[in-house]
Image (spheres, grey):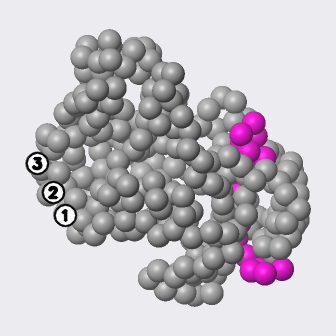
Amino acid sequence: MEFLAPTTWADALAVRQEHPDALALTGGTDVMVEINFDMRRPPALLDLTGVRELSDWSRDGDVVRLGAGVTYTRVIEELGDVLPGLAMAARTVGSPQIRNRGTVGGNLGAASPAGDSHPPLLAGGAEVELASVEGAATIGSHEMQLWLGARGIESIGMNKGGRFEAAGIGFTMVHADHSGGATLGTGSDQVTRDLGCWGWVIEFEDGTTVYHSGDTDLFGDMNLVRERHHPEIAVLPIGGHYTMGPRDAGMALDLIGASMVIPVHYGTFPILTGTPEELRDHTSAEVVALEPGQTWGE
């Protein structure tokens, strides 16, 4: 296993581009456990603990910019009066040794089922900053394109029914039945801007077609996805409460006609109670349940 240890943010982005399969880590509280139990064996580790830019935080008025490498201990000691909700959540994380190593960015990046930092970040309207060497563009609604563009992020705006092709892969935006927006500001000045919600039909170069519904409820026009696109694989939420649950996801598969389904949006919060096992009770399609970070192919 190769060990990569950049010391600047620019070097980290360059190393990531050169080694796209490298697994990034800061505290290693999740990653090292998985490696020790032979649950994961990445070809390389990208150690970000030496990147100073990730361990800094700053404040501009009501906005706090928190580096992904700031540990839970520092959140408690340095940000208790600025981000009290996050500091309270940080105090519940494991032992002092774990808090000394674990980071908010790692908790998000690892999609930890514990999700210690997720609720206060969600409640505070946190925004995640992304970066890459190539500055890859995002594809989304026209409203999202305007919102991201105002923040210097390249984005391609479109609307439902539209199709865009990138790197030989086709993306068709289709309907979804859900909420979608960005919450701005804090306290009494907090407002939510509607950015829309949608799903994708993704056509790969080898002819495989995937329907990713996005977060959504069951709706009858899923049958149109079947009639227009004939997807072999569907990616559907099953958690319930915020999206459809396993039973409705099974009904959705009847409408879509996909022979294989990858369930998502479940198990990350206690309230998302749907499981792949329940989904199997409601569909004849093959259910492929993936772990966070797992790669799958037919």
State yes or no: discs 2 and 1 in contact (Cβ < 8 Å). Answer: yes
Mark 2 residue crowding within 10 angstroms, few (<14) / some (14–19) / many (20+): some
Would you say residue 177 is visible in this rendering? yes
Position above or below: 298 against 267: below
Q: Position of residue 197 (x, y in %)?
A: 65, 55
Quadrant of the rendering where the N terminus is positioned: bottom left
State yes or no: residue 239 in magenta.
Answer: yes
Gap in Å between the C-alphas at discs 2 and 1? 6 Å
Please tell me in which quadrant of the rendered image residue 206 appears: bottom right
State yes or no: residue 23 in magenta.
Answer: no
Q: Nearer the viewer, residue 234 or 120?
A: 120
Tell me where the magenta segment starts and ends, as one range.
Answer: 227-244
Label 1, on which residue? 14
Amino acid type, label 1:
Ala
Q: Position of residue 230 (x, y in %)?
A: 77, 80
Amino acid type, label 3:
Thr
Would you say residue 116 is visible in this rendering? no
Of the two numbered discs 1 and 3 on the same chain, state the one appearing first in sequence.
3
Q: Is residue 121 left or right of residue 102?
A: right
Label 3, on which residue? 7
Which residue sits at x=36%, y=39%?
Answer: 106
Label 2, on which residue? 10
As drawn, the residue found furthest toward the front would be 189
Position above or below: 287 against 52: below
Which residue sits at x=14%, y=40%?
Answer: 52
Q: Position of residue 72 (x, y in %)?
A: 32, 23
Quadrant of the rendering where the C terminus is positioned: bottom right
Gap in Å between the C-alphas at discs 1 and 3? 11 Å
Q: Is residue 10 left or right of residue 295?
A: left
Gap in Å between the C-alphas at discs 2 and 3? 9 Å
Which residue sits at x=28%, y=26%?
Answer: 61
Mark 1 residue crowding within 10 angstroms, few (<14) / some (14–19) / many (20+): some
